[in-house]
Amino acid sequence: MNNMWNYVKESTESVEHRAAWYFKAGFRWLIISVVIGLVCGVIGAAFSLSVAKATSLRMENPWLLYCLPIAGLLIVFMYRAFKVSGKGTNDIIDAAREGAKLPFLLIPAIFIGTVLTHLTGGSAGREGAALQIGGDLANSVGTLFKLNKRQMGITTRIGMAAFFSALFGTPVAAAAFGTMVVNVGSISYMVIFPGLIASCIAADVAGRLGAAPVKIAIKIPTYHTALAIKICVLALLAAIVSVFFIKMLYLARYLYGRYVKNPYLRVLVGAILIIALTTILGTRDYNGAGMDIIVKACQGQVKPLAFFWKIIFTAITLQAGFKGGEVVPSFFIGATFGCLVGDLLGIPAGFAAACGMVGVFGAATNSFLAPTFLAMEVFGGQGLAYFALTCIICYIFSGYSGLYSAQRIIYSKINSERIDASPNNYHTGDFEKKSQ
């Protein structure tokens, strides 16, 4: 009887100890996530409003395009002066995995560099800056809390999610993207808890400070098997377009690296090419992020080769040394391609644009949940089956390409085998044959 009583007592004490430890750890992460959410919300709003103002000024003053070479030289000089040359999103992903310390001066460098790029007409997005600024800010917060390396990696992911949410106003998609983009196929649910809290706070704070969330109204058809089959065809084609986009980015990097090694000369060449192409094509549609063109595509309005020219403009811009990101261009590419092909397939053009937008984004970033959640938050919460079909097909059939070479793809996309490979450096043939 005494032995039984001692066992019950020890078990009760053990449960109480575990409960206290869980409460303490959970409360600590709650505090950290609130701090990161507030910081990212404020800085994210400032960044979003700055990019919006730069875009507005460029559209009101077309002559700013001819300042692109000067902006490029300033960006290269600033990165060298701040000693962050070569630093980018891949370094943030590495830090999120390894818990490494990030250079604080990367924050003002990518902030100013992205604003200058948008002001003068470079073709770039803003999420690359979001991941870098958010990850670096959270990294600094982790230092203040004296976290260990593993915990520092978690805070970096939280910051990536929070800043993404501050810019786009999509907390669920941001939490999924920021926390899962590092190791594809391996989800740490513990990271999602603070990541989602920080994302919700950042989106709310940024919205209150004037940063408008991304919301696009479209008409979503009711579910029908025939339409679902057409959506599958569209998704397969979107996956191919995503791979082409990534290949063009790497081709531009190779050509710049081989023929224009000096960074100052490289950014000048890139600026001149963008100015020349803009003049030849006679349109400013492919300068900046192009959110206005994305909205038009979702309304069924598209130029036939818009997706192709956005790929070319973005590859020239980013690989020359201008700053921003590739995700919003992937939105543009997917939306314009979807609108074009959807009309040919008999899919409502605006809805096809929405599917193409999230599909190319998911394929390019090797993600499934994030683009599915993004569709729900941006397009109003309907059409889940269509969007999920698009995103999973694009994820699988884009193969092992990706925007971020620092990602790790943990499992094969067509076999239940662990591969732990890097995008763009993984050759599927030998492994997949061996797995069958």
Image: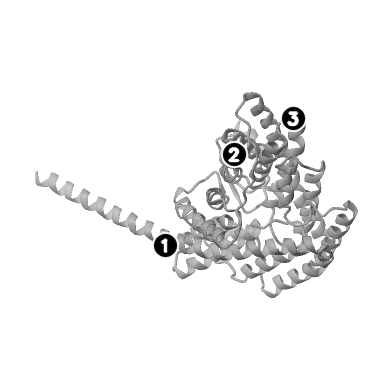
Tag in front: 1 or 3 = 3
Q: Tell me the quarter of the picture where residue 301 sits.
A: top right
The secondary element bearing badge 3 is classed as helix
Q: Is residue 246 visible?
A: no
Residue located 77% across and 31% down the image: 344
For marks 1 and 3 on the same chain, the one whose residue lies earlier in the sequence: 1
Asked if marks 2 and 3 touch (Cβ < 8 Å), the reply is: no
Task: Quickly name the residue at label 2.
Answer: 412
Q: Dot 2, crowdedness within 10 Å: few (<14), some or many (≥20)?
A: many
Residue 345 is labelled as 3
The alpha-carbon separation of the residues under discs 1 and 2 comes to 37 Å
The alpha-carbon separation of the residues under discs 2 and 3 comes to 31 Å
The alpha-carbon separation of the residues under discs 1 and 3 comes to 50 Å
For marks 1 and 2 on the same chain, the one whose residue lies earlier in the sequence: 1
The image shows residue 400 at horizontal and vertical percentages of 66, 43
Task: Quickly name the residue at label 1.
Answer: 31
Depth check: 216 or 9 in front? Answer: 216
Residue located 69% across and 59% down the image: 324
Task: State the quadrant of the N terminus.
Answer: top left
The image shows residue 162 at horizontal and vertical percentages of 54, 57
Residue located 68% across and 68% down the image: 112
The secondary element bearing badge 1 is classed as helix
The secondary element bearing badge 2 is classed as loop
For marks 2 and 3 on the same chain, the one whose residue lies earlier in the sequence: 3
